[in-house]
Amino acid sequence: MLKKMIKTSFCALAIFVLVPTLANASTWGPWQTIPNASGVAVSFSQVNDSMCTWMIRNNGTTTLRHLEFSYTYTPAVQARAVRGAATGYDLLLSPLKRGELTGGATEFGAETGRCPTTLVVKRIEWAH
């Protein structure tokens, strides 16, 4: 019993220490419509000085079945060969019903000191 309590306490401490403030990203920007994706909005949060995350919300009238997008950012740590802006690509992991949102640090993020200004839609598919 004592061994189990110690193990549980150790795991809880490890999670607390190893998981940065990403889960507590509480300062979110306003919802903004994504260009070329009427009915889809994004909100960004600068979690700390080197991490940005975002949420996507379906404001449309049907289920958003698929969304592929890109975003431009300046990497927090510049590689020797990479200077300036970089482009990241991502997609929704599952369909979003009308009014639902998804995202945050467990799903979307970029190592950058400044959040992207928007997302650029590469492919979008709505349910009929």
Image: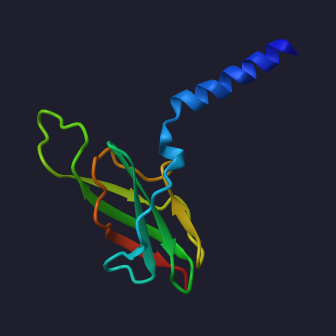
Q: Quadrant of the N terminus?
A: top right
**How is the model colour-coded?**
rainbow
The answer to whether 123 appears left or right of 7 in the picture is left
The answer to whether 106 appears left or right of 8 in the picture is left
Q: Using the image, determine if residue 119 lies above or below residue 22.
A: below
Residue at 23%, 37% (x, y): give it: 77
Q: In the figure, residue 80 lies in which quadrant?
A: top left
Q: Nearer the viewer, residue 51 or 39?
A: 51
Residue at 48%, 36% (x, y): give it: 20
The answer to whether 12 appears left or right of 82 in the picture is right
Q: Quadrant of the C terminus?
A: bottom right
Q: Nearer the viewer, residue 47 or 57?
A: 47
Residue extending farthest to the right is 1
Residue extending farthest to the front is 27
Q: In the figure, residue 10 lies in which quadrant?
A: top right
Q: Nearer the viewer, residue 72 or 91?
A: 72
Residue at 48%, 44% (x, y): give it: 22
State the count of labels. Answer: 0
Q: Using the image, determine if residue 9 lies above or below residue 52.
A: above
- Looking at the picture, how far across and down is residue 78, in whole percent? 18, 38
Residue at 11%, 36% (x, y): give it: 81
- Looking at the picture, how far across and down is residue 2, in whole percent? 84, 13
- Looking at the picture, how far across and down is residue 24, in whole percent? 53, 48
Q: Using the image, determine if residue 122 lies above or below residue 60.
A: above
Q: Nearer the viewer, residue 14 or 127?
A: 14
Q: Using the image, determine if residue 115 lies above or below residue 119.
A: above
